[in-house]
Image (cartoon, rainbow, N blue to C red):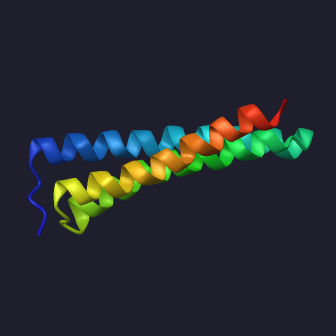
Amino acid sequence: MVELTETFLLVSFAKVIALALGTFIVSLAYRGYRRNASKPLLYVSIGFSLITAGTVIEGLLFNVFQYDLLPAIGAGTLVTILGFVAIIYSIYSSR
C-alpha cells in the first residue's frame, strides 16, 4: 500500500501537471501536423508524447507499482531519451 505523505502528494501533483502540459503540447503539435501536413510537426508530437509518457511511466513504476527508484527512473529516462531523439529528428528532417 502506498503511504500518502506530503512528499508523495506533491510529487503526484507535479506529475499530473506535467501530464496535462505535455498533453496540451502534443495536441497543439498534432493539430499543426494535420493542418499543414508537416512531417516534422508529427515527429515533434511523437517526441513530446514520449517525453510525457516517460514522466508518467516513472511515477507509475515508483509510486504505484513500488519498483525501486533506480529502475523506475531508468525506464522513464529511456522513454524520455527516445522522445528527445524524435524531436531532434524532426529538426534535422526539415532541412
Q: Is residue 63 left or right of residue 76?
A: left
Q: How many marks?
A: 0
- 56 or 77: nearer the viewer: 77
x, y (%) of residue 73?
28, 51
Q: Which residue sits at x=64%, y=45%?
A: 86
x, y (%) of residue 19?
46, 46
Image: 66 above or below 9: below
Furthest residue to the right? Answer: 36
Image: 88 above or below 73: above
Q: Is residue 91 left or right of residue 53?
A: right
Q: Which residue sits at x=49%, y=43%?
A: 20
- 93 or 1: nearer the viewer: 93
x, y (%) of residue 14?
32, 39
Q: Which residue sits at x=24%, y=69%?
A: 65
Q: Is residue 81 left or right of residue 6?
A: right
Q: What quarter of the picture does the N terminus occupy?
A: bottom left
Q: Which residue sits at x=85%, y=29%?
A: 95
x, y (%) of residue 10?
21, 40
Image: 38 above or below 62: above
Q: Is residue 6 left or right of residue 56?
A: left
